[in-house]
Image (cartoon, helix red, strand yellow):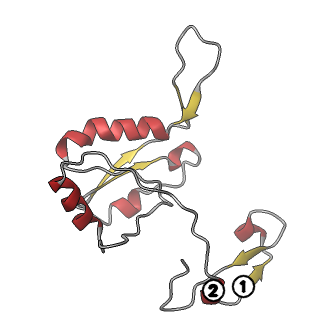
Amino acid sequence: FDHFYIYDNSGALDLDTSLKPIADLFPGEVTYVPWPSKVCNNRPNNVDSPGERSSQYAAESSCRLRFGPHVQWIGQFDIDEYLIPMGKYNNITSLLDTLDKEDTRIISFGSWRAWPRRAFIDEIKEIKDFQTCWHNEPCFDLSVQTNTTML
């Protein structure tokens, strides 16, 4: 990818957190857009249903309208989503080059839960700390052994 557009929704929940310091580490490579909306309302005036949806849909539309005309490809991912090139592709650029040659304009990727391979996970350590676990029940620290993948 040549450029990233970050729509930062963290201000909707907590005014003390922001992705801006991270974006600022990459001048010229990241465009930071504060997006503090909690929900957007897509209901017509004549309907009783509130029709509220996550502001993510509005942020995605904003990104397509504002930046779409200036880029060849645009991808939209949550911060916890990522691509793993597979098959004959070892990077996203070669895949997009192939799709360009085929005159493909829209692509959709499958989404699978990543189930860890137990053989490559270090010994599981129980954590009994409210600040870490966010509740009074224990949680667990999972770490992957060095030089392995958990998928």
Measuring from the top left, give residue 95's x and y in whole percent: 26, 63
Given residues 151 and 143, the one toward you in this image is 151
Could you tell me how far apart the alpha carbons at marks 1 and 2 are, in whole angstroms?
A: 8 Å
What residue is shown at x 56% (from left), y 33% (from top)? 53
What residue is shown at x 59% (from left), y 24% (from top)? 51
Q: Residue furthest left?
A: 101
Residue 19, image quadrant: bottom left
Residue bearing the label numbered 1:
124
Is residue 93 among the parts visible in the rendering? yes
What residue is shown at x 50% (from left), y 88% (from top)? 148
Residue bearing the label numbered 2:
121
Given residues 5 and 111, the one toward you in this image is 111
Measuring from the top left, give residue 137's x and y in whole percent: 84, 68
Measuring from the top left, give residue 44's x and y in whole percent: 52, 14
Q: Are marks 1 and 2 in contact (CB under 8 Å)?
A: yes
Residue 129, image quadrant: bottom right
